[in-house]
Image (tube, rainbow, N blue to C red):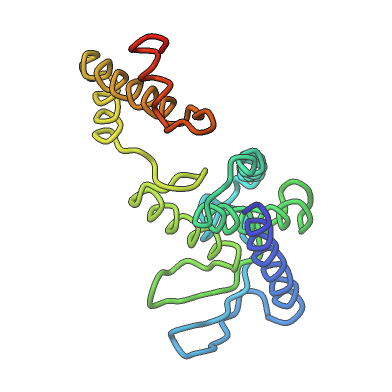
Amino acid sequence: MPLLLVAVAATVLISDQIVKNWVVATLPEGETVPVLGGFLQWHFVRNPGAAFSIASGQTWIFTILSAIVVGVIIWQIRRLRSVPWALFLGLLLGGVLGNLTDRLTREPGFPEGHVIDFILTPWMMPAIYNIADIGIVSGMILFVLITIFGLSIEGGREKRGAEAEGEAEAEAADPEVADASDGVADAADGAADAADAPARPGQAPGATEERSAGGTP
């Protein structure tokens, strides 16, 4: 699973940075370039805030928060056994690293570089965003589904409150019932041992026990 996480994160990060470099080299800053009419447009801006141009002017805060998120995700890799969680963490890690790379390497300089935003979909939202933002939002949508279905990061489903209580009650059942079950198991084991006792040559199985019970002939 860690390999899946790394592959997803690398795909998001690399594609984000390649496209951003193309945007900086090709598109005019601050101008709208129609791609699919009003459905999809390019609009190159330098964003000093968070995803979707939120909280402009607080770049250094988001740089610190992004670094913390990256550290938490890396720490959780040791527990990762679930494909949905690997996809979620990979999308989130790739998106966070994409925007963090901008903040660390682009103008006006470390650690307050401006994030390159260029995707504009007026029919959906007025904000301008990038591929890294798409990765982050897609990851959070997946996280909501993971929570709804109760999937554990270590694989399988997490036990709900009622289910966990039911198992606890079963374990704390009447001890007399448990003792009776143990007695039946012991009797069965004893019968199995008796059946497995080897007979002497020319002697039918079970004869040893009969003679012992009746005395030596």
- Residue located farthest toward the front when viewing the structure as drawn: 217
User: Of residues 121 and 68, which is closer to you in this image?
Assistant: 68
Q: Residue at x 25, y 26 (%)?
A: 170
Q: Residue at x 74, y 46 (%)?
A: 111
Query: How many marks do you count on the picture?
Result: 0
Residue 182 spot, x, y in % from top left: 32, 20
Is residue 150 left or right of 108 when viewed as pictured?
Answer: left
Q: Is residue 51 above or below residue 68?
A: below
Q: In which image quadrant can residue 15 be found?
A: bottom right
Whole-percent x and y of residue 12? 64, 65
Q: Is residue 192 positioned above or below 214 on the image?
A: below
Q: Which residue is at the front of the view, 192 or 141? A: 192
Give the position of the N terminus as an image quadrant. bottom right
Position of the C terminus, as image quadrant, is top left
Taking the spot 33% from the left edge, 51% from the top edge, the residue there is: 148
8 or 34: nearer the eye?
8
Q: Is 145 drawn above or below residue 171 in the view shown?
A: below
Q: Position of residue 140 (x, y in %)?
A: 46, 55
* Residue 206: percent from left, percent from top: 39, 27
Image side of residue 112 versus residue 175, left or right: right
The residue positioned 44% from the left and 48% from the top of the image is: 156
Q: Is residue 152 above or below residue 9?
A: above
201 relative to 167 in the view: left or right: right
> Looking at the image, which is closer to me, 77 or 201?
201
